[in-house]
Amino acid sequence: MTRFIFITGGVVSSLGKGLASAALGALLQARGYKVRLRKLDPYINVDPGTMSPYQHGEVYVTDDGAESDLDLGHYERFTGVPARKSDNVTTGRIYQTVIAKERRGDYLGGTVQVIPHITDAIKDFVRSDTDDNDFMLIEVGGTVGDIEGLPFFEAIRQLGLEVGRENALFIHLTLVPYIAASGELKTKPTQHSVKELRSIGIQPDIVLCRCDRPIPESDRRKIALFCNVREDAVIPALDVQTIYEAPLSYHVQGFDNQVLRAFGLRDAPEPDLSRWRDVASRIIVPEGEVKIAIVGKYTGLKDAYKSLIEALTHGGIANRVKVQMEWFESEIFEKEDAAVAHLEGVHAILVPGGFGERGTEGKIKAATFARERGVPYFGICFGMQMAVIEAARNLAGIAGASSSEFGACANPVVGLMTEWMRGNELEQRGVNTDLGGTMRLGSYPAQLVAGSKAAEIYGTTKIDERHRHRYEVNTDYREVLEKAGLRFSGMSPDGLLPEIVEYPNHPWFVGVQFHPELKSKPFEPHPLFASFVQAAVAQSRLV
Ligand code: GLN
């Protein structure tokens, strides 16, 4: 029978609940258990797809095409288990399901209420698709006490009862702040947070205490006493040098031992953490450093580029170097010669995904700089589209080249795609369809040209990668662009949608229509990122 572990948070948000969950998943996996992680998000958007990256950070896309919470990225990077649509739900989605049933008349005249209808829908979600996993780790977004979180807390309380206490575990993550003026750690916020949780009927089994320094025995004892948990079950969650050290640190603090003990699993083998040790040491003691410029639009909030940052770090792991990321708002390059001033001296340039016209001329300038100077360039999704517009304007002489995303233009080298095949099914979109959930989303196959740089990097000519975009490079311009030197080295299997472009005569210039960063793992760096960082290392020896 699948066991459920519920992870909640208190005191403040951003304590690293997603990471704690992912690290626990990794630890259980390292002991031979099969795990899957899930996130329940109390906000009302149906999914984060329509939210600004400034509000919500990155939208993580799954193979099966869900636009989901960025914590699913942590889960996947830490466990290697591909996330699915059924791993993330929001209040909005739950209500959408319940209201659709109500409209169909499924409630047979009954009054539809938060309890039991909404809570039942949440429970159904949590219990669906659990497969043959030993553990389902269920993270509840937000903090205890939030009004919108209440139905979720009530649902997991009921679930604890229904699956039996021997099959459910509640973990609560809180903050133990250090007050400099008095030189003390404070346990009161933790006490209050657990009190809040108990007032809605949930007694945590384990309290994780985020703290910037070791927590003395006496404070742990106090927390245990007032929160009604055993002292061993008060686990310090200390700051680490890299997130990939978290499983190691949690293991030292006894986290996985306490979890297994609570389930009565006393004879589980010790975890094999060698791969985590290797990854952490490659990050903490690198053998060199490369400087990579990231030219984007949401550079003020790093969460907007979560998977990208991790994938670059993984590229560094593969090459045993530290990747120093230099962030640039692309708009600054729109001034004459600004690109040269800022980009001279970087070892590689990456233009990530993005939406909307603002800052695009700056991204195009960055692509020109990389192409002309032979500096490694990696264009991801929007970054590929900008590189293609750059090639059209500056190599093929198509002055009016642009994307129809920015309005009607003379030469839509990048245009709105209204029809494409997904497997055997035709997907169709109109100009005025909803914005939510209507992009080309999720995993699609691509065919690479044998002998191309792309095929060499992947070591194969057949790949699958995840997409999230509405526009495509327009194949009407393929011939003229190829004549100008830009090679289309990856296409959709039907040959209609360009997936990868590259310059054969450049040290490393690759644009991809998909998001390879979503599939990179610390112990399995994505080949494109490993190769890109390797090219940056080569460039660093030249400058
Ligand atoms: N805005 C572009 C599109 O919709 C690129 C999207 C992206 O970079 N994810 O096609």
Image (cartoon, grey):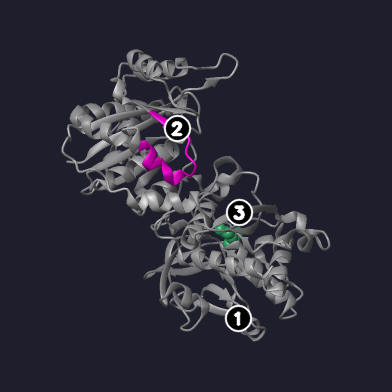
Spatial separation of the CA atoms under disc 2 and disc 3:
24 Å
Residue at x 55% of width, y 66% of height: 532
Please report contact status of discs 1 and 3: CB closer than 8 Å, yes or no.
no
Indicate the quadrant where residue 154 lies. Answer: top left
Amino acid type at image mark 3? Gln
Q: Which residue is mark 2?
A: 238
Residue 159 in the image, given as x and y percentages of width and height: 26, 30
Q: Nearer the viewer, residue 438 or 143?
A: 143
Q: Nearer the viewer, residue 345 or 489?
A: 345
Q: Quadrant of residue 522?
A: bottom left
Label at residue 428 = none
Task: Give yes or no for contact between labels 1 and 2 (Cβ–Cβ under 8 Å).
Answer: no
| Label 1 C-beta lies within 8 Å of the nearest ligand 1 atom | no
* Image-quarter location of ligand 1: bottom right
Q: Which residues are magenta?
A: 236-250
Q: Residue at x 54, y 60 (%)?
A: 469
As measured in the structure, the alpha-carbon distance from the residue carrying label 1 to the one carrying label 3 is 35 Å
Which numbered tag is attached to residue 324? 3
- Quarter-wise, where is residue 233 in the image? top left
Which is nearer the eye, 28 or 281? 281
Choose the circle earlier in sequence order: 1 or 3. 3
Q: Is residue 427 above or below residue 154?
A: below
- Mark 1: amino acid: Arg
**Quarter in which the C terminus is drawn:** bottom right
**Mark positioned earlier in the residue sequence (2 or 3):** 2
Q: Secondary structure at mark 3?
A: strand
Residue 13 on image: x %, y %: 50, 30
The answer to whether any part of residue 349 appears in the image is: yes
The residue indicated by pointer 1 is: 478
Find numbered disc 1 in the image and state the secondary structure of the residue it sits on. helix
Circle 2: element type: strand
**Disc 3 residue crowd, few under 14, some 14–19, many 20+, Cα 10 Å:** some
